[in-house]
Amino acid sequence: MRNLKFGATAAALFAVAVTALPAGAETTVLSNVTVIDGTGKPAAPASAIVMTDGKIAWVGPMAQLKAPAGATTRDLSGKFVMPGIIDGHVHVGMMKDVTQDVKFYDRANVEADLKTYAAYGVTTVQVAGTDKDVIFDIRKDLRAGRPSMARVYTSGQGLVFKGGYGGLYGLNVPVGTPEEARKAVAEQAAKGVDFIKIWMDDERRMIPVKMTYEVSKAAIDEAHKRKLKVMAHVYYLDDAKELVRQGVDGFGHIVRDQDVDKELMDMMKAKGTWQMSSTLSREIVYSMAVMPWINDPFFTRGVTPGTMSALRSPEREKAVMLGAIRFPGLPYEKRLFADMGRTVVQAMDNYTAMVKTGVETGMGTDSGPNGRFPGFNAHEELQMEVMAGRTPLEAIKSATSDNAAWLGDKTIGSIEAGKWADLLVMDDDPLADIRNTKSISAVYIAGSSVPTIWQTCRDRPSTACTGTWKDRSPTPY
């Protein structure tokens, strides 16, 4: 009874606070909504959210709402609201249609990607190791006010091994010794990165070298000395175990060469190592010769005309099925799609095992490079998490408050008083069907409405795109 009395008192105090806002404050009330707050709590129907100057001033039952004088009220009866999605593993600014090249990376291209993420309800992204230094100016501007595109966390230029796999050719400076690794980390830290990214992979043994454990340990130790987390690209179970022993903070991909075992998962739990992103949607794209969503307006609105033409071409299907691909600057060919069906299954099985064991898991897509699409893949990732055994509520939590916890950002990730009003409004209930996250009615960043994907037509006039949520394709899986 004492707790109930305290709860009622707190609600009353909140109501008083909302009615006593500073003069001139910009306030919007979203009324009659079902709130999915991102913390894992059950949905709260018949609720309201009060946003003032970009932040959540109050959230609670409609019966307790006392809207401030002069507030703008938007009746959203029948709609559902969750926090904006946080994608913990992306790359930006590197593509022109389906061609990946460092020469395309500039501020305009980065911001075009960030606006596309926002249109899909992805209001924060963490860029994993492939940014030019202009990203720091973009990040500064986004953090200085109320952004109209996705917020950014960056690791600048991640660490790749000399002659090895990873990064964006022409951008990342390869390291070959522990001394070079420590120097590279120090250089990134001096620029003000949010974390450090390293790659430990040999592209399924197609490359003769891979980052050594001496180099990875030097990078991790130097990063921790500078109070920075380290995210590692990993593929093999043995490498994952060694990196956990060295103190890596999180993995940007899941183990895919074999089943994860009790030893790895117990170590990760004991050390607090995150499966920061599992990139399941990345793995399934690599197993498809023809993308089943190729005509879905939820997809087509967010990609360029050149991308659409390339993806629909018979030449691509033939190359995927039969040929190897040589990316700009790489000294070897990549048989991207060989045996990827098995890899998808392995990734899903390992994700399921980690969730059941209680390993900390975030959500990330590795979207941005060829074949993985900004914003779109986040919704596919949530769907695949549910296919792997999570409930929709758990999947939403992984992409909101859990990812905010990984970032260490207490201002985003849940619908709570004092946090930024980064919100995704949906027509249909995502807890009934996780695919309903695509039924986007509105997106708010810092309390301001931004164009949704249903109002977007990338790189062409808005009238060139047709189709609505009701015209969506059946699920491809």
Image: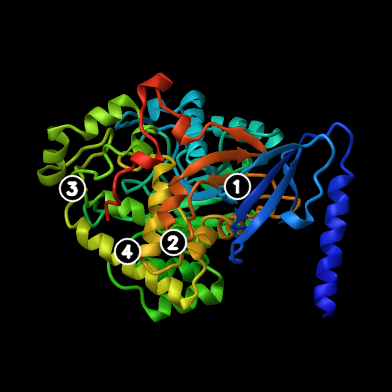
- Disc 2 secondary structure class: helix
Q: Residues within 10 Å of mark 2 (few under 14, many from 20)?
A: some
Which dot marks residue 313?
A: none
Task: Evaluate whether residue 254 shows in this view.
Answer: no
Tag 1 and tag 4, C-beta contact below 8 Å: no
Q: Is residue 462 above or below residue 193?
A: above
Please name which of the two marks, 1 or 4, marks the residue nearer to the observer: 1
Residue at the disc numbered 4: 347
Mark 3–mark 2 Cα distance, whole angstroms, equals 29 Å
Question: Residue 378: x percent and y percent?
Answer: 43, 48
Residue at the disc numbered 2: 214
Would residue 168 appear left or right of 419 to someone viewing this image?
left
Picture quarter with the N terminus: bottom right
Identify the mark nearer the N-term, 3 or 4: 3
Question: Residue 453: x percent and y percent?
Answer: 45, 35
Mark 3–mark 4 Cα distance, whole angstroms, equals 19 Å
Identify the mark nearer the N-term, 1 or 4: 1
Mark 1–mark 4 Cα distance, whole angstroms, equals 39 Å
Pick the residue in front: 334 or 115.
115
Residue at the disc numbered 1: 77
Please name which of the two marks, 3 or 1, marks the residue nearer to the observer: 1
Mark 2–mark 4 Cα distance, whole angstroms, equals 27 Å
Q: Residue at x 56, y 39 (%)?
A: 443
Residue at the disc numbered 3: 335
Identify the mark nearer the N-term, 3 or 1: 1
Would residue 275 appear left or right of 425 to someone viewing this image?
left
Task: Evaluate whether residue 307 shows in this view.
Answer: yes
Identify the mark nearer the N-term, 2 or 1: 1
